[in-house]
Each structure stands twice: as C-alpha cells, then as structure tokens.
Image (spheres, rainbow, N blue to C red):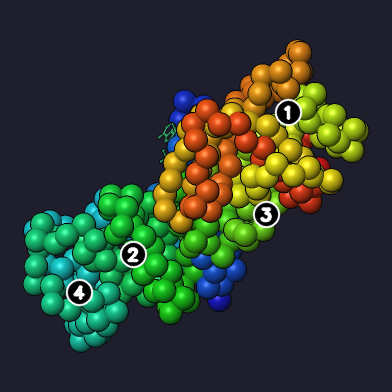
Amino acid sequence: MAGVSLRNVRKTYVGGFEAIKGIDFEVGDGQFCVLVGPSGCGKSTLLRMVAGLETITSGEIDIGGRIVNQIEPADRDIAMVFQNYALYPHMSVYNNMAYGLRNRGTPKPEIDTRVQEAARILELGAMLDRKPRQLSGGQRQRVAMGRAIVRQPKVFLFDEPLSNLDAKLRIAMRVEIRKLQRRLKTTSIYVTHDQLEAMTLADILVVMNGGQVEQIGNPLEIYQKPATTFVASFIGAPPMNLLPAGSDEIKTQFAGALGEAGILGIRPEDFAISSDPIADGIALDLTVEAIERVGAETFIYGTRQREAQGVAANPGELPPGEVIVRVPGAVAPAIGERIRAITPREKLHLFSADGRKRIE
Ligand code: ATP
C-alpha cells in the first residue's frame, strides 16, 4: 500500500515568503491526484516537497505509511517526470531509461527486462538506440515516462509533463498517461495549470489558490458544486458567469428568494435562448457582442442591458460584464441582436457576497 498523506504542510522560503499555508489531503493507494491552480499558487512547491527536492517547513508528509520529512529524495521510492523531460542528451533512449537502475546496482538482466517492458508499453521499441535529439517532443516525453516506469516506484510525481507539447499531442499523451496509470495502478500526483487536463486525469482534484486548498474532491463534483467563486471561475471553460445577486434585474425576478446570496453563478451551458417567459428561473436580456462558432457548439458573448443593471453598484458587486452563453452549433444569433437567455432555478449556484462560501 502506498498512499500519500499531507498533514498541515507549510513552506516558508528563505526570505520569509510563505508559499504553502497549511495543506492537508490524502491520496489513496493507486489513485491519481491532480493539483491544479493558477501560476504561483504553490503547486510545484508542494510536489517538490513530496519529492524531497524542497524542505518542509512544518507539517508531515507520509508516503506508504512512512513519514518522509527527513528522508532523501532517492530513498523516498518515488519517480518524477518533469516538464523539460530532463533526459541526458548524450545517452541513448535505452541508457536514459536504464541509468537510474544502474546507479542502484540493479542486476543487468533485470535492467534489460524492465527497459524492454517499458519500451513495449510506451511503443519505444524501435527507438532504443536513438539519442533524445533524434526524437519528437512526444517521444521524448514517453522516454521520460519510461524512465519513471522502470523504477517501479511507489508513487509517480508529474510536474506539468505535457506543457511543451502542441495541443493535439497533449490530448493524445493525456489519454496515454491515464491508461498507463490505470494499468500500473501506481499512486500518482500530477501538477498542471490546465483545468481540462486536471478534470480528465484526476480521481481526486485539489484546487489550489494562494498557497491554500480551495476545494478537494471528485472532478465532476467540483464542477457541479464549486465551493467558492474562485473554483467556479477556474474549473470550466468558458468559466461560470458570476452576477451580482443584488442588481435590480435579478432581485425583481426572485423577490427575496435568494436569501443571503450575494453572487449568482450560471454555467454557460445552463442557459437556453428563448423568448418564452420562465416561471421558476431567471431571464437575462442580452445584446450579442461577439460569437464564436467552434462547430458542435456556439459561444455567445452578450452584455446585459444597461437600464436593467440597477442604479448604484453594491459593495463587492462584480462589474457588470459579459455573460457567456453556450448553445448548440446550429444556433447563431447576429452581432447586435437582442436575445433572452433563460435558466431554471435549479441550475443556479448561489454564493456569499465575498465568494468564499457556497450557499446552494
Ligand atoms: P507555476 O504554475 O507558475 O509553475 P506554481 O503554482 O507551481 O506556479 P510555485 O512554483 O510552487 O508555483 O511557486 C509558489 C510561490 O512561491 C510563487 O509565488 C513563487 O514566486 C514562490 N517561490 C518559488 N520558489 C521560490 C524560492 N526558491 N524562493 C522564494 N520564493 C519562491
């Protein structure tokens, strides 16, 4: 069994900057955990602390039932895959994969078996004699994966391993990594700032912001019930629309039914375009500013009509910005057209005025 637990983990860098402000979570044996958050939120710092490449200021990190705070990276039984692959340029693919095992004194026949097996899984069999410069980006990435696999570690750590690949290859490799992890059943922690990558890979998603955890859970649950407006905006593309619940347009439609909610959230796909009145829900009158037709669907960028926005902005109210509506590809209103976007009551997300609390 090789789960990973973080207990009140903190990191203050030399100079006093507190990059990690007390983080707790648990990754079960064989689970795939993704740390996601904007640039600078501390995800690489946290991963490097699990790897032992960064000291832990306080708290505990436990790998497979052993507290590893004082244990050297080489003795933590982890293998890390980096963004830049970190391959040795002068070594063949075979030797890149074999290197770590040789250093540990693994017997030669055993090394050969493991390297050949990894090469087979990763379809690198025909490339074992090549040098990294003779490989494509995707192939280099697979060699980096191979190097991790041959170690047969308790835990894989991935630090944005796909960020140097083009969009199409990223998607293909994302699927490969997930298939590989399901097959090997190795506990994994994966860092990315790409919310789509995070959603598709994770068994457990940890959304980070400013050195803290905003929300932990199953990715779909997080999408369906974001705990804060930060998570609501970060997970999902295009992001959730956040509207001030106190504006006249919204207040008059709900007449107090929003309780203490200060912010109302609506996913772009939860709107429909309709001129019919909606009995239990909300209707927003929009002017179409821009549309994006991406084939299967159309994104409509509308602005709410000025006269409906209320007189004075409430404190903490979001600026009256765009509303994004996601509709099937066949729907395509004209620029400047006025449309009505409706959504039923049960699709609304309600948050406190500061966005830190989900009300329903
Ligand atoms: P990115 O997606 O941009 O890589 P990240 O979420 O991985 O970002 P980290 O690299 O973990 O973020 O950095 C977290 C914070 O800690 C940042 O504000 C960064 O400037 C700071 N930081 C990182 N390394 C050091 C260091 N050695 N000394 C001081 N501050 C650091």
Q: Residue at x 60, y 50 (%)?
A: 269
The residue closer to the viewer here, 245 or 125, is 245
Say what amino acid the circle numbered 1 marks.
Pro
Mark 3 sits on what residue?
224
Residue 102 visible here: no
Task: Give the residue type that dot 4 points to.
Answer: Leu
Q: Secondary structure at mark 4?
A: loop
Give the residue at mark 4.
Answer: 124
Q: Residue 27's quadrant in the figure?
A: bottom right
Question: How many residues crowd mark 4 within 10 Å: few (<14), some (14–19), many (20+)?
Answer: many
Closer to the observer: label 1 or label 4? Answer: 1
Tell me the quadrant of ligand 1. top left
Mark 1 or mark 3, earlier in chain:
3
Image-based side of 128 in relation to 273, left or right = left
- C-alpha gap between disc 3 and disc 4: 40 Å
Q: CA distance from mark 4 to mark 2?
A: 16 Å
Q: How far apart in space, not on screen, are marks 1 and 3 (Cα)?
A: 20 Å
